[in-house]
Amino acid sequence: MSQPYTPTPRTRLVREAERAVYDREAAYRILDEGFLCHAGFVADGQPFVIPTSYGRRDDNLYIHGSAASRMLRQIKDGVPVCITVTLLDGLVLARSIFNHSMNYRSVVVLGKATLVDDPGEKLEALRLLSEHIIPGRWADSRQPNERELKATSVLRVPIEEFSAKVRVGPPIDDEEDYSFPTWAGVVPLEMVAGAPIDDPRLDPAREVPAYARQYNRKP
Amino acid sequence: MSQPYTPTPRTRLVREAERAVYDREAAYRILDEGFLCHAGFVADGQPFVIPTSYGRRDDNLYIHGSAASRMLRQIKDGVPVCITVTLLDGLVLARSIFNHSMNYRSVVVLGKATLVDDPGEKLEALRLLSEHIIPGRWADSRQPNERELKATSVLRVPIEEFSAKVRVGPPIDDEEDYSFPTWAGVVPLEMVAGAPIDDPRLDPAREVPAYARQYNRKP
């Protein structure tokens, strides 16, 4: 069971507070539907934001280092990070420019990332990461060997301090603007998977597995 | 015309250097296809990463403050920011777990954001932002008034120091893995627009404009 959560001054939403979600379960549903995060860290006073995949188990996020050596050099000692996940659901077209918006669901996690040293936890985190992106793929793949595990760093970020924001529904215009002569509404946006493309070197007799043919992020 | 660009030590890619793109035109094509960025800034040593929309003119990015007051409080004095734009194009399923990857195009811009004070540049930046997200909408909307312009902050981030990364194509496996008995290839991913949803308070006689009905980010 997840614990109750009270926002800190750093994660309490000041603007658009009506969009705030402080419920841990709701935040985890967003984290579980997404698989790409933007990880922020600081080096010499400069913020860096790097896209990378992630996995979750209980109250921890895991990211791995193959794509982010610059980040890893900084954060393996437990330097502060920010992990942000954004699911974009639509463009909100209001009558006034000012009230245009987007429908989205986002989670911002503030925490200290630490290197996962234990070989068992590391392998399990890599499995989580893989299964988070495309469930079923891990068991169908050639498993990591010793050399590959050594070449991969895994970081754990506890989900302690976080905020989530959700905007849904139609535009909200100022009352006097509802008579303005223009279309208003929502253009829905969705990330969809296309038909899988065989590797040119694939045995043509091999069929596309269901997890690739019917790939879908929706719960 | 854009200027030639030489990466700095902060933006030269160390890992996966074969994916690096230092061509300004190529980076701008990525920035122009996307419209959601993740903006990073530092407050009291803690990195924050916030999703927000952006626009571009020449060698400047513009973001606006309605969704990011926390960021604006920090960066209006010219504090360092990182603006990252990521377009996700597919999941790359290799034979080995280790060689799994994603097809993507991303740009990381390091710079100092400054507040746009000039009323003319501010209005023009808001128009750029709007037209960047959905071309044609600005002229169809009720224009910003004095009060709304005062309530909106706009930040300019010069695109001076940046890096871009692009991965395309099939998985690259270790030679000895090509005989491993599993499917391999790419699951394409794309952000697509659905049928526009009328605002419940819309005059039913009003038709959906083409820019909303045929919304498409591809150039």
Image (cartoon, coloured by chain):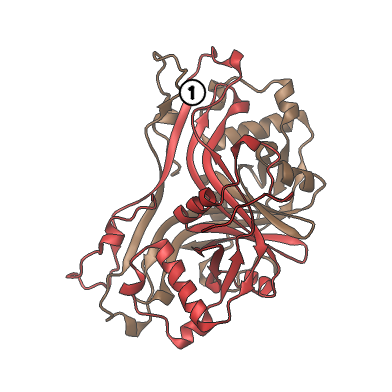
Chain colours: A red, B brown
Query: Would you say residue B6 is visible in this rendering?
Result: no
Q: Nearer the viewer, residue B86 or A12?
A: A12
Q: Which residue is mark 1?
A: A184
Instruction: Classify residue B196 as left or right of residue A96.
Output: left
User: Which chain's residue wears label 1?
Assistant: A
Asked if residue B181 is positioned above or below residue A219 in the image, the reply reads below
| Circle 1: residue type | Ala
Where, by quadrant of the figure, is residue B165 drawn?
bottom right
Q: Position of residue B186 (x, y in %)?
A: 34, 63
Q: Position of residue B105 (x, y in %)?
A: 50, 57
Where, by quadrant of the figure, is residue A128 drawn?
bottom left
Where, by quadrant of the figure, is residue B103 drawn?
bottom left
Q: Position of residue A209 (x, y in %)?
A: 25, 64
Q: Helix, strand or loop at disc 1?
A: loop
| Residue drawn at x 51%, y 59% as measured from the top left | A1
| Residue drawn at x 54%, y 57% as measured from the top left | A2
